[in-house]
Image (spheres, helix red, strand yellow):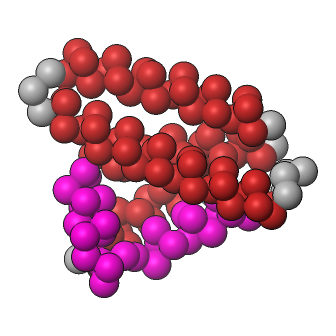
Amino acid sequence: MKALSDAVYSQVVKNFESAQGGERVKIKHLLTSYYQMGLRYPNLTLTVFSTPEAFSTEAKRITDLLSELLEATALSPKRRQMWLDILIDFTHGSAIATAMVRRSNVTSAKKQSLRYFQQLDELLDQMF
């Protein structure tokens, strides 16, 4: 499972390497890519949550990248950790919920994805 997780999440890191712009833009790019991978492989995400040994090096790398981007902001260490937790949990929850809805209602899933992107922008506006 760890090897599979590494293979899937390495794509997020590869996508991130082409990100251009400031911290806000790069955070959005990273989380958007991670969200889309969670939509594509929701069962893998759930397995990683329930099986600690399946937690991949690449998933940790994504968290580290996000943490580094947050360190470049003017946020205090306490607020950076808070925003790291909020953004990761928000992205996980949204991807899994949307993937579950998509199984029975593609139209609702598209609306839910649109809400994720809008709400992510709102969160980033508040953070920055």
> In front: 36, or 49?
49
Relative placement, left or right, of 91 versus 108 is right
Quadrant containing the C terminus is: top right
**What is the x, y in percent for residue 84?**
63, 56
The residue depicted at 20 percent of the width and 56 percent of the height is 43
Q: Is residue 41 visible?
A: yes
Relative placement, left or right, of 12 versus 54 is right
**What is the x, y in percent for residue 13?**
53, 61
**What is the x, y in percent for residue 106?**
19, 22
Furthest residue to the right? 74
**What is the x, y in percent for residue 58?**
47, 72
| Magenta stretch, overall SS | helix
Relative placement, left or right, of 43 versus 127 is left
Relative placement, left or right, of 43 versus 78 is left
Q: Is residue 60 above or below residue 65?
A: below
The residue depicted at 85 percent of the width and 58 percent of the height is 76
Q: Is residue 24 above or below residue 55?
A: above
> In front: 84, or 9?
84
Q: How many marks?
A: 0
The residue depicted at 27 percent of the width and 24 percent of the height is 109
Q: Which residues are magenta?
A: 41-70
Is residue 90 highlighted in magenta? no
Quadrant containing the N terminus is: bottom left
The residue depicted at 38 percent of the width and 39 percent of the height is 94
